[in-house]
Image (cartoon, rainbow, N blue to C red):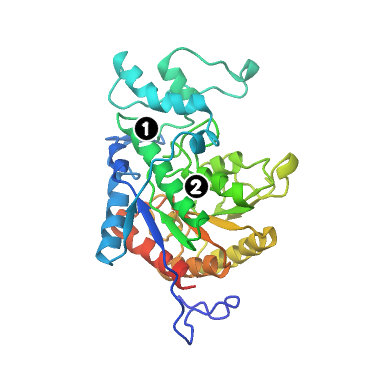
Amino acid sequence: MSTAGYGARPTEPTEAPAVRDMTIVADPTHRRHDPPYDLDAGQRRAPRHERAERVDRIEQHLHELGWLITDAVPSGNDPLTAVHDPDLVRFLRDGYDAWRRAGGAEVMIPDTHPSPRWARGGRRSRSLIAELGWWCFDTATPLVEGSYAAARAAVDVAVTAADAVASGTALAYALVRPPGHHAGPDYLGGFCLFNPAAVAARRLSEGGRVAVLDVDVHHGNGTQDVFWRDPQVAYVSLHADPDHQFPFYSGFADEVGEGPGRGSTHNLPLAPGSGDDTYLAALEQAAEVVDAFDPTVLVVSAGLDLAADDPVGQLAVSDDGLEAVGRTIAALDRPTLVVQEGGYAVDRLAEQVTRFLDGVRTG
């Protein structure tokens, strides 16, 4: 792709750019979340799009490039419950074991969800399958024996990387799995159990204003809900139009936050099939919003499912475009935490992540 004339950030600088050092954090516990199948649009899907191979391939590729990867440090429950309802945490910790003791199947998937049209918004039930439906909004996010451990480790990865940024590291990459931006204060879904990016942003906001820039092809409904009324954290998202793309019920341009957080939420929905030129122009708008908010730290929800060959996404950003996205983020010139979200072209994901990170590192 040629990006000649794209803002003030040339594709081919005349001088070699400075390369920012990057702290990378990961944890192998993600492999324990390994459901054999999920239910997507009424069909049994195996192998799942969101599987351990995604992160294993990224990590292997980064090792081959000689990039140092450090282990996560346990963070305790306080950062987690600063974002998520303690009852949701308890359910993810204990619900699957209770389900199995009661004779439930190996894979725990809800089949009943409370409708907002029900009187009083629906009531909690003692049934385990009903409780799962209370917390989980879809059938594509199954739970198995290791799901809680993996989700908990993902939070530790993000918090460890966030603490590195808070301590003066200019750039950190949290290689988390499962992803998180669809998980809200009191719900999970969309492959997401906890929300590591939101946990990291809330923790970083203790030291100043934080902007979360979400470039995943899907709207991060969970992250938006976490910070809906929070003036300390701006949420800025580019994503495929929810009239056509999951999660369908959020991510419209008129969603701007409420109360003290009104005006801190910005959504830029894009038409299906949008490619480099359209995406990068919208990203420039998003960058202007972030600059105007003037955050102390930038958190990037890095879903690489915006790529043209992703089997889940509906956008058409090239590999060159992914690197240009990274350069735009670098040009914001803030301490930056990149948190892995989606990206499901398993055979190409490691290369795509590397192109994106190269852009963020070199500017």
For marks 1 and 2, the one nearer the N-term is: 1
Residue 237 visible in the current orientation: no
In the rendered structure, find residue 63 and report the number of the disc placed on it. Answer: none
Above or below — where is 101 with respect to 55?
A: above
Residue 15 percent coordinates (x, y): 47, 86
**Nearer to the camera, 306 or 265:** 265
What is the quadrant of the N terminus in the image? bottom left
**Nearer to the camera, 123 or 69:** 69
Residue 60 percent coordinates (x, y): 26, 57
Task: Give the residue at x 39% y 67%.
Answer: 355
Location of mark 1 (residue)? 148
Type of the residue with mark 2: Ala
In the rendered structure, find residue 197 and report the number of the disc placed on it. Answer: 2
Task: Give the residue at x 46% y 79%.
Answer: 17
**Nearer to the camera, 348 or 333:** 333
* Left or right: where 251 falls relative to 28: right
Above or below — where is 8 with respect to 134?
A: below
Residue 189 percent coordinates (x, y): 46, 35
Name the residue at the front extreme: 167
Q: Badge 2 local density, few (<14 within 10 Å), some, or many (20+)?
A: many
Task: Give the residue at x 45% y 73%.
Answer: 362
Provide the secondary structure element on which disc 1 rests: helix
**Nearer to the camera, 34 or 19:** 19
Above or below — where is 93 with respect to 172?
A: above
